[in-house]
Image: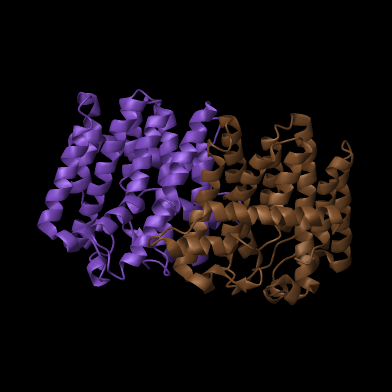
Chain colours: A brown, B purple
């Protein structure tokens, strides 16, 4: 990871933690465990990739950092809720997340379901808050970008396809489509929401969408490669689950070498979409490279 | 139930079913079971009380019926998702809902979690749709009203309190607060969203909020009474679970007679908030009465 990105991610992680700490004060009533579970899910873990994409995009076009940060909290809340529900026994049944117990291990299954549900609602409450985004058009557009990316036409739809992929029988186009929904949609929404906050004009958005599309696919190929060859200790969770599950993946379809080459090509292509920008786009370039290098 | 309300509920049920049928076409891919599960949850069941409250409120102030209907689909999607998650084995573990198998019984637990999640996202996608609500202020306000009512500060927070209430030790103010969050917040949001669609001025909203507050509380007392003395066959699901669970309820605190009197008083009070209106508010009056009479 380059120094610029490392410093930016470090600053942002602190701001995201502080933002959730303010948004989720534990109330002095019977809801305390709900808030504790929500805080467990969103504070002090994760690389904050989606927030970074959103903030870096907004910054590139001179958008308000305060507004970008609030939108970043919303998309991170959706990402975090999806992990909480993913980890449930009836889903992936993962006991660890970000190197600590998953929410249902720490707070029980019912609380994990409800904390995830409340985090999704929180995301839309943040985005529709008149005190953050004075312009109602910005509020409505942010909500629409996130809701469309999060639901059956995006992330949740991709998760269902992912479950079906465990039965095998998915070819490369089907895997690509699945991954575009499962992780690509939310990564693309991060870039789109940054563009909304910064009022990026149409032409700029076309390039940003190309960038987002390419890093989304590169991200998932890298994820498959990590699952194939990564270090469970570094990842903070169990790996090589895909092969064990007999699941269709990019690596299984292409082989590791071709998959790696494909991810590299996508990163170059993503960076090419930023050609109109000088060094002020270096953060987005660094993010594109990091996405295939990260140790999960 | 009076004839006016019976006819209106019948018409609305058909429109809600048709609306969800259009919104959720089963796609010809691996996501098909997700859409089937979502359709199972929202089509052909439930009394559509929240949609009716929303549409009747909008209608009272001359709001667009088409817009009110779309907003009604959104709030019903949130209500339906909460029932899907409530019925999960790790929550209430209910096998039946609206006289048919609950979603996890019909589609499995993972699909029930995901269908619920996707229904919540759908709600906000509907409300932020520029093709339905041209005015971005209306879109943003609708989203905020629903998100605030659905999350940790509303419905989900109330559900967590409800779980805590099973341990006993809740007094009457605590039960009231719990119910205000658990069901009151969403019923109040239905009225508020109807007011947003119809651009109701401030003074009108104050009265509508009073109405919504009173019917919300009456609703929950009636629910406790039904659980205490209702007919499981008519309700289409198991009853008398609260007493079995040793849970704090209005009936347990007040006794059935005083609880019934309290619900009746709240209905009268709710109707008094509509005093400025003539017979054009009869639908809302009928709803207030129905809320304590219904057989669940």
Q: Position of residue B48 (x, y in %)?
A: 33, 44
Q: Is residue B230 visible?
A: no
Q: Is residue B7 visible?
A: yes
| Residue at the left extreme, as displayed | B257
Which quadrant is the C terminus of chain A positioned in?
Answer: bottom right
Residue B161 falls in which quadrant of the image?
Answer: bottom left
Q: Position of residue B134 (x, y in %)?
A: 53, 26
Residue A197 falls in which quadrant of the image?
Answer: top right
- Using residue A296 as the reference point, say whether residue A27 is left or right of it: left
- Using residue B286 as the reference point, say whether residue A120 is left or right of it: right
Residue B128 falls in which quadrant of the image?
Answer: top right
- Using residue B149 as the reference point, say whether residue A134 is left or right of it: right
Q: Is B54 rendered above or below residue B76? A: above
Residue drawn at the location 78% of the way across and 72% of the way down: A228
Residue drawn at the location 76% of the way across and 47% of the way down: A213
Q: Position of residue B269 (x, y in %)?
A: 18, 38
Work out whether residue B59 or residue B236 is closer to the camera in this orientation and state it: B59
- Using residue B112 as the reference point, say whether residue B205 is left or right of it: left
Work out whether residue A73 or residue A206 is closer to the camera in this orientation and state it: A73
Q: Is A194 rendered above or below residue B82? A: above
Count of numbered badges drawn on the protein? 0
Which quadrant is the N terminus of chain A positioned in?
Answer: bottom right
């Amino acid at each position: 990871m380059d120094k610029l990105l490392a410093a930016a991610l470090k600053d942002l992680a602190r701001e995201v933690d502080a933002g959730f700490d303010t948004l989720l004060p534990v109330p002095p009533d019977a809801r305390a465990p709900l808030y504790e579970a929500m805080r467990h899910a969103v504070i002090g873990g994760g690389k904050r990739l989606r927030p970074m994409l959103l903030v870096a995009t907004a910054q590139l076009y001179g958008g308000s950092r305060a507004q970008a940060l609030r939108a970043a909290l919303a998309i991170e809340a959706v990402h975090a809720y999806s992990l909480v529900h993913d980890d449930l026994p009836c889903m992936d049944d993962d006991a660890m997340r970000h190197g600590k117990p998953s929410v249902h291990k720490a707070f029980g299954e019912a609380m994990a379901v409800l904390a995830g549900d409340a985090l999704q609602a929180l995301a839309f409450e943040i985005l529709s808050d008149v005190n953050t985004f004075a312009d109602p058009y910005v509020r409505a557009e942010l909500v629409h970008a996130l809701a469309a990316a999060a639901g059956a036409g995006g992330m949740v739809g991709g998760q269902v396809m992912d479950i079906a992929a465990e039965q095998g029988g998915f070819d490369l186009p089907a895997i690509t489509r699945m991954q575009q929904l499962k992780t690509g949609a939310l990564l693309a929404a991060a870039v789109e929401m940054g563009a909304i906050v910064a009022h990026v004009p149409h032409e700029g958005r076309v390039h940003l969408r190309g960038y987002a599309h390419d890093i989304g696919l590169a991200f998932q190929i890298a994820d498959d490669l990590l699952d194939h060859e990564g270090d469970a200790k570094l990842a903070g969770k169990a790996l090589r689950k895909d092969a064990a599950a007999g699941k269709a993946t990019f690596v299984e379809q292409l082989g590791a070498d071709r998959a790696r080459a494909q991810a590299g090509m996508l990163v170059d292509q993503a960076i090419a979409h930023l050609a109109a920008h000088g060094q002020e786009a270096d953060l987005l370039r660094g993010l594109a490279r990091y996405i295939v290098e990260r140790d999960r």
